Amino acid sequence: MRAARLRRGLAMALTACSIVVTVAAAARSTVPGTPVRPELPAVRADNLAARYAANHRFIAASQRAARDMGDDGRAKVLGQLARKDRHFLSFSPRGDGQVVEVLGDLAHADRIAVVVPGSDTTVDTFDQLGTVYASLNGGARALHAEMTRLQPRRKTAVVAWYGYPAPRTMSRDIVSTDRALDGGRRLAGLLGDLRTVNAAAPVTLLCHSYGSVVCATALRRMDAPAESSLADVVLFGSPGTGVRSRAELRTRVPVWAGRGATDWIEGVPHVSLDLLGEQVGFGTDPVTDAFGARIFPAGPGSHSDYLRPGGLPLRNISLIALGRGTEVSDD
């Protein structure tokens, strides 16, 4: 009976959400006249400067197009991205967009961290989503600063990876693995690119909320060379990963999980159902013994507090990204 009620409830939620997302999608369409995406140099250490420069020109041209079409909101966002001190591996202004920013010297870093975001990430929220540190860029910058503070002499790089079509919270996609399947393929490709750029640097995947489903998908499909560069996987604010246990992720690297004491994600039903031919729900709670991850203390915070400057979870996540997981603590 309980399973039947849950199935009916999810079905009703999906129907309602499908209406909401149709209306929401109509609110932001591609700006007419957007410049043609340039041919970019391959992601290699000797091409990074040229790739950054090409994306900078593309962002600036996209800003002008948005302004010419009267889309002042998008033009303002793109103006921030177009600053010359910023470096982008990938960018697209179409629809919700795509933004992959690099903080630090990727080719010469001793450690690399990749931040994989969850729902409601778009080109418009990349720099600002509620509080600054809750945005992908703000959280990545806080992480880079904390890693530098904890180990000033170590060269670190952080990749803020909005490289997949993240679901909206008020949509049916938020309870499905569909977006994660596409995202996981793209993320596995990024990890291969990072190995090409800097094979010596261990990479840590930092996966927030729905981003943990994306990371889990990438782990299950990446090839051996890409995985050989992987040092740790960190799940925080996770609704689940789409699998029953850490063993099903098919990775040999340590998998960590943490949840703030007031994170609403704790109340999400940890089930996985086949509903009308679609997988709904993400299975076992990653912070339970049944999942089998290493637990790190995440303090009293809520769903958007994990990368808040000065917070306990930021310190612990940074220590793991630096390869100092033995120093993770609750104070």
Image (cartoon, helix red, strand yellow):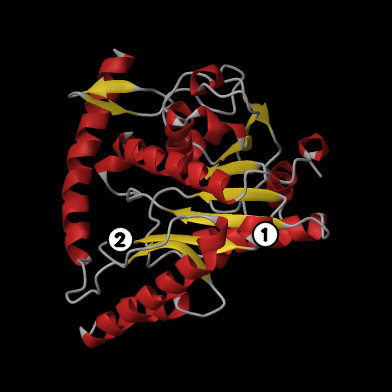
Secondary structure of residue under mark 1:
helix
Residue at the outermost front position? 46
Residue named by callout 2: 96
Task: Please tell me whether residue 157 is drawn above or below residue 284 in the rendered image.
Answer: below
Q: Kindly identify the amino acid type of the residue bearing the numbered disc 1.
A: His
Q: Position of residue 229 (x, y in %)?
A: 61, 37
Relative to 289, is 221 on the left or the right? left
Let me know if residue 308 appears in the view: no
Between the residue at mark 1 and the residue at mark 2, the CA separation in whole angstroms equals: 25 Å
Category of crowding for the residue at label 2, using alpha-carbon neighbours closer than 10 angstroms: few (below 14), some (14–19), many (at least 20): many
Say whether marks 1 and 2 touch (CB < 8 Å). no
Q: Position of residue 225 (x, y in %)?
A: 54, 32
The residue positioned 24% from the left and 70% from the top of the image is 36
Looking at the rendering, which quadrant does residue 281 occupy?
top left
Task: Please tell me whether residue 238 is drawn above or below residue 88 in the rendered image.
Answer: above
Looking at the rendering, which quadrant does residue 95 occupy?
bottom left
Secondary structure of residue under mark 2:
loop
**Quadrant into which the C terminus falls:** top right
Q: 148 and 5: which one is in front?
A: 148
Relative to 270, is 202 on the left or the right? right
Q: Position of residue 279 (x, y in %)?
A: 29, 26
Let me know if residue 109 appears in the view: yes
- Considering only order in the chain, which callout, 2 or 1, is on the residue closer to the N terminus? 2
The residue positioned 32% from the left and 62% from the top of the image is 97
Q: Kindly identify the amino acid type of the residue bearing the numbered disc 2.
A: Asp
Task: Please tell me whether residue 17 is drawn above or below residue 308 in the rendered image.
Answer: above
**Quadrant into which the N terminus falls:** top left
Q: Position of residue 318 (x, y in %)?
A: 71, 49
Q: 43 and 2: which one is in front?
A: 43
Relative to 40, is 320 on the left or the right? right
Mark drawn on residue 144: 1
